[in-house]
DNA sequence: TACGGTCAACGTACGATGTACGTAAGGTGT
DNA sequence: ACACCTTACGTACATCGTACGTTGACCGTA
């Protein structure tokens, strides 16, 4: 029996295995050993399938918000929950982020974020704004990370060497920092920016 | 005479007028009153056309970095330069961001950013990391803004009302902040996050 | 003037994609 | 036994990127 769940599951598996570009109705049908048009009995169109993937991915968010902890720690954990999902379903996450799929995660994370901001002493409008800022950072970090990976893959082998051999008169810092620019530790980078953000919030007047 | 420049120009115009989804080789050819395959005498494939769009868009970045100013102000202006481009070519910018087009902007902005970080007193590795964090924010802010616009368009009319009528027991903050959540002033949001970031940098030990 | 070469533009054609629409087969209630 | 509904299927079409071969205008040389 074909169901929406099986279809979405196959799509998720396919995307994680072969990348987002490999997602086509025909490929999903093939994955299930089924004819293409059979899918349309359960999924109205491809956009709906994308929404299904988004829901399936984002519902693996677990948000164990312990109100007794320090709000900084709670905020960190909330953002890290997103990052964990992105690590578990990297290709699906990218698909969602880049195709700006319709409101993938529900209101629960928003509610949590606003609660944390409230407990930290921020007023309503400020809470909304700082949530937006932190969401922007999390989205961008994910995007930038995959960009970086792709770039480093496309550069031949000795990317640092190529940077280092630029004209030092025009690019003094780039040549000096060639090694750092071509090295990439996603977790460290992410945590660095996250810390920056949390500290900035901490310093904000309320 | 058909040239790469004319083709890219037509593509940019088309994307800004009809959106990124409207970009097809046939549409670009139509825009120029020319047969589809004629484009391939000047552009090897669609990916190259995307790169052309990215270059064309990002070369309108102007970076008047005045080294005598305060580094905070210089950093702000560097980020705002990106945002200006995003405001001038919104659809092209989104196309670039979401399709992670190959290294669209050159090394000049990177060099500027690193120079500013150096003048602010940060060491090399830290400069690289904080540049990455700020790039993540700028990318994500752009992404989130278009998401937000799309979401508000898709929601019927009285989105705030819909939020406000949720179960206040499950979503106390969301219902209380329904108005703020459905209102959107992109510039204010962007500047709020940018300030947050700059202040965080300012507070960072060096 | 005639000719051979170059090159920009074109037309045809193919495979892949999303999906509208009609068909068939098996189960269920009367 | 018969009508009906559900579920899967096959055919068909528009649109996409692009490989490949053809055309026709131009230009230097004989």
Image (tube, coloured by chain):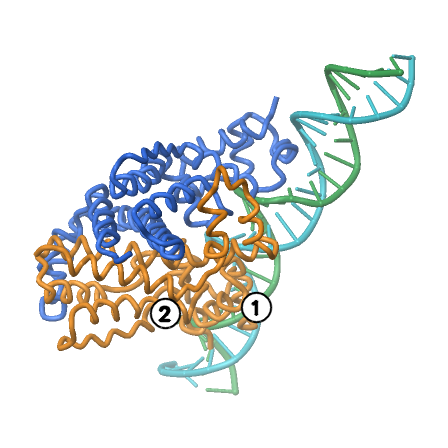
Chain colours: A blue, B orange, C green, D cyan
Residue at coordinates 21% horizontally, 67% vertically from top-left? B75
Q: 10 Å neighbourhood of mark 1: few (<14), some, or many (≥20)? A: few
Give the residue number, with chain letter if any, for mark 2.
B85
Which chain letter matches label 1?
B
In the image, residue B107 sits, relative to residue A39, either above or below, namely below
Along the viewing direction, whichever of C15 and A71 lies nearer the viewer:
A71
Closer to the chain start, of discs 1 and 2, is 1
For marks 1 and 2, give the CA distance: 27 Å
- Regarding residue B147, the answer to whether it shows in the image is no
Along the viewing direction, whichever of C7 and B97 lies nearer the viewer:
B97
Q: Are marks 1 and 2 in contact (CB under 8 Å)?
A: no
Along the viewing direction, whichever of A14 and A88 lies nearer the viewer:
A88
Q: Position of residue B24 (x, y in %)?
A: 52, 60
Q: For the C terminus of chain A, give its image quadrant.
A: bottom left
Residue A94 image-quadrant placement: top left
- Mark in the foreground, 1 or 2: 2
Residue B70 image-quadrant placement: bottom left
Q: Which mark is residue B30?
A: 1
Residue at coordinates 23% horizontally, 54% vertically from top-left? A200
Which chain letter matches label 2?
B
- Looking at the image, residue A171 sits to the left or right of residue B79; the answer is left
In the image, residue A59 sits, relative to residue B20, either above or below, namely above
Q: For the N terminus of chain A, give its image quadrant.
A: top right
- Looking at the image, residue C19 sits to the left or right of residue A160; the answer is right
Residue at coordinates 32% horizontally, 46% vertically from top-left? A142
Q: Position of residue A13 (x, y in %)?
A: 44, 31
């Amino acid at each position: 029996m074909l169901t929406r769940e099986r279809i979405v599951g196959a799509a998720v598996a396919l995307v994680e295995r072969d990348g987002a570009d490999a997602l086509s109705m025909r490929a999903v049908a093939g994955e299930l050993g089924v004819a293409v048009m059979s899918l349309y009995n359960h999924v109205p169109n491809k956009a709906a399938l994308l929404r299904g993937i988004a829901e399936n991915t984002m519902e693996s968010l677990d948000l164990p918000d312990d109100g007794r902890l320090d709000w900084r720690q709670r905020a960190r954990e909330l953002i890290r929950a997103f990052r964990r999902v992105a690590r578990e379903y990297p290709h699906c996450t990218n698909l969602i982020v880049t195709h700006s799929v319709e409101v993938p995660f529900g209101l629960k994370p928003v509610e949590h974020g606003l609660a944390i901001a409230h407990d930290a002493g921020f007023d309503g409008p400020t809470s909304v704004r700082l949530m937006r800022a932190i969401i922007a950072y999390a989205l961008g970090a994910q995007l930038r990370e995959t960009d970086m990976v792709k770039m480093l893959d496309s550069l031949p082998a000795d990317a640092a060497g190529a940077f280092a051999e630029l004209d030092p008169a025009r690019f003094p810092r780039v040549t000096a920092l060639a090694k750092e620019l071509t090295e990439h530790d996603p977790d460290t980078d992410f945590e660095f920016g996250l810390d920056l953000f949390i500290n900035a919030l901490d310093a904000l007047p309320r």
